[in-house]
Image (cartoon, grey):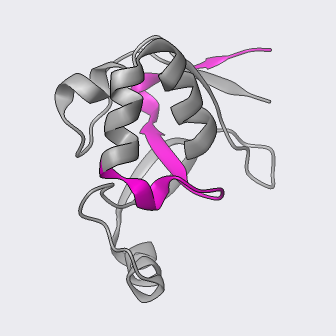
Amino acid sequence: MAEVRIIAVPTGEAPPAVRAKWVGLCLPIRRTLLGRRRRRVRTIGVLTGPRTLTGLLRALFQGEPIEGYAVPVLPAIAILELAHPEAAAWWRANTPHLMRRGQHFVFSAEVCAEVES
């Protein structure tokens, strides 16, 4: 599986100290159907984003578009847990709606470096 290394503090709604804990970690990324790693996607806030299906569908058209990498939430949190348990605990406590299969974080391309395997 392809990976990215987080090389700078990502933007987002989590506290800066929590976001800083991603720096230096290698995270698995999801490839597109065409095999691309990097993609342009619409994002929503992890804290302020919608929680209903209708809200999520609306967000697909209204979210902020960024160029970045989709990282599955559960493996990312497991990796974060090994390096920084307190940061992983923050994510579990504050974003329980993301703690399931099929959910992805999107890390901006500017804070990522692709890791060749």
Q: Is residue 27 visible?
A: yes
Region of the chain picked out in magenta, as a range: 94-117
Query: What is the x, y in percent for residue 18?
Result: 27, 28
For the point 35% across and 61% down, the residue is 44
Q: Is residue 70 left or right of residue 31?
A: left
Query: What is the x, y in percent for residue 8?
Result: 34, 18
Q: Is residue 38 visible?
A: no
Depicted 59 relative to depicted 30: above or below: below
Depicted 7 relative to depicted 75: above or below: above
**In the depicted view, which residue is nearer to us: 106 or 93?**
93
Query: What is the x, y in percent for residue 106?
Result: 47, 45
For the point 35% across and 67% down, the residue is 63
| Residue 63 among magenta residues | no
Q: Quadrant of the N terminus?
A: top right
Q: Is residue 14 left or right of residue 39?
A: left
Q: Is residue 67 left or right of residue 78?
A: left
Number of marks: 0
Residue 15 position by quadrant: top left
Query: What is the x, y in percent for residue 110?
Result: 40, 28
Q: Residue furthest bottom?
A: 54
For the point 33% across and 46% down, the residue is 93
Q: Quadrant of the C terminus?
A: top right
